[in-house]
Image: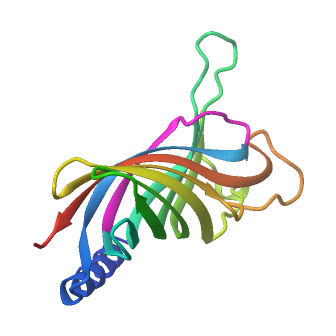
Amino acid sequence: MIQRLFFLLLILFSFSVNAQRFEGGILGGLSASQVEGDFTKGYHKPGVLVGGYVQTDLSRTAFAGMEIKYAQKGSRRNPDKKSEDQSKYIMRLGYIDVPVYIGVRTSETISFLAGLSAGFLMHSAEYDNFGKFPEEDEKPFNDFDFQAFLGVRFEMTERLTLDLRFAYSFLPTRDLVGEPTNYWFDDQYNNMLSTALYYRLGK
């Protein structure tokens, strides 16, 4: 997976270097996610984001861009110390996401953006109080994810930008098959909040 990500980042950087109107850089950050359709609630599953981006100006105020990044998603429920419910559940998902977006600058330091993101599942696992789910209890996840997202950016320096983003899946993370279980009662959809720093490379 890491080799694939580096290869895709190399393509992005080569494209931005050879195209005068494009700029490119690297990004890294943290996410908080949940999955609609399981029995957990709240953005309790932390994760990391890492990748790269290219971007170009469409006008003085508008811009467009594309990213390739590894993103951890899923959901988590910890035992409740205030009740008798001591059940634990963790869903760990890892994707290669390819977002494309349009942005508008509203000032010298603030911009808003909206876009769509294709996601390709690289790995998945589920855990409860007894450890990793046995193979016979696993229900397969869909290989492809498709999200819409909204975000706001704050330009901190000439090269460093802070990106805050909310993303929600249009397609199910996995489909309901057979009877619901204790951990799964409907089609499931990724739902994520993220904070990332973008560092522009080159001139």
Q: Position of residue 137 (x, y in %)?
A: 72, 53
Q: Position of residue 15 (x, y in %)?
A: 27, 86
Horizontal side, residue 81 vs residue 96: left or right: right
Is 93 a magenta residue?
Answer: no
Horizontal side, residue 201 vs residue 91: left or right: left
- Between 92 and 36, the residue placed more toward the observer is 36
Quarter the N terminus occupies: bottom left
Residue 14: quadrant of the picture: bottom left
Quarter the C terminus occupies: bottom left
Q: How many marks?
A: 0
- Taking the spot 24% from the left edge, 74% from the top edge, the residue there is 23
Horizontal side, residue 158 vs residue 185: left or right: left
Reply above or below: 104 against 193.
below
- Taking the spot 53% from the left edge, 54% from the top edge, the residue there is 150
Colour approach in the figure: rainbow
Reply above or below: 76 against 136.
above
- Between 146 and 3, the residue placed more toward the observer is 146
Is 44 a magenta residue?
Answer: yes
Task: Write the start and end of the magenta stretch as one range.
Answer: 38-52
Q: Position of residue 111 (x, y in %)?
A: 39, 54
- Taking the spot 40% from the left edge, 63% from the top edge, the residue there is 70
- Between 137 and 2, the residue placed more toward the observer is 2
Q: Position of residue 96 (x, y in %)?
A: 45, 68
